[in-house]
Image (tube, helix red, strand yellow):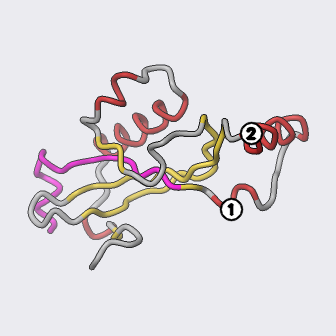
Amino acid sequence: MLGVLADPTVRIGVYIDDDHDYYLSPIGDLDVIAEERAHFADGTWSAYLLVTVVQCPHCDRRYSTDVLGGVVAETTALAGSIVWADNPFLRESSADYLTMHIRDLIAAEREDPSPATAWLPLPGDAP
C-alpha cells in the first residue's frame, strides 16, 4: 500500500456528512447563532463534516485522511455523498462557500498526501 503515494492515479474527494454535534452546543456571537438557527429551521443552511477521501488505485477501497467539522453552508443535495476532484459540480459552483472548502481540502491532500498508513476506512465501508 505504501507505493500508492507515488501513484498519480490516486483519486481524491470529499465526503459530505451532516455535523450533528454542531447543533448541540452553540459557541460564539449570539447574533450569528440566532441567524444560523433561523436558517437551520427553514432548511436553507446545514452544518457539515467534510471528510477528505482517497481511493486506492489498486484495491478501490476508499479511506479518510482528514475531517473538517462545523462547516455551515447552504443546504445541498450532495450530503451523504463523495464529491471527487473531477466532479463537474466543482467547476460549476465557483463561488459557493461549500465548494471552496471542498476544493481547499482536495488541494491540501494533493499537495501534502497523507501516508497510506494514516488512512482510515470510511464509516460504513466494508474492511
Compared to residue 50, the image places residue 89 above or below, namely above
Q: Position of residue 67 (x, y in %)?
A: 49, 56
Q: Position of residue 124 (x, y in %)?
A: 38, 72
Range of magenta residues:
1-17
Quarter of the picture containing the C terminus is bottom left
Would you identify the image quadrant in which residue 93 lies? top left
Type of the residue with mark 2: Asp
Type of the residue with mark 1: Asp
Q: Please tell me which residue is depicted at 83% across the width and 42% down the height of the picture.
A: 33
Kindly state the secondary structure of the residue where label 2 is placed: helix
CA separation, marks 1 and 2? 19 Å
Number of other residues with Cα within 10 Å of mark 1, as a class: few under 14, some 14 to 19, many 20 or more: few
Q: Is residue 13 magenta?
A: yes
Compared to residue 59, the image places residue 84 above or below, namely above
Q: Which residue is mark 1?
A: 21
Q: Is residue 27 magenta?
A: no
Q: Please tell me which residue is depicted at 27% across the width and 55% down the height of the picture.
A: 54
Q: Please tell me which residue is depicted at 30% across the width and 40% down the height of the picture.
A: 111
Kindly state the secondary structure of the residue where label 1 is placed: helix
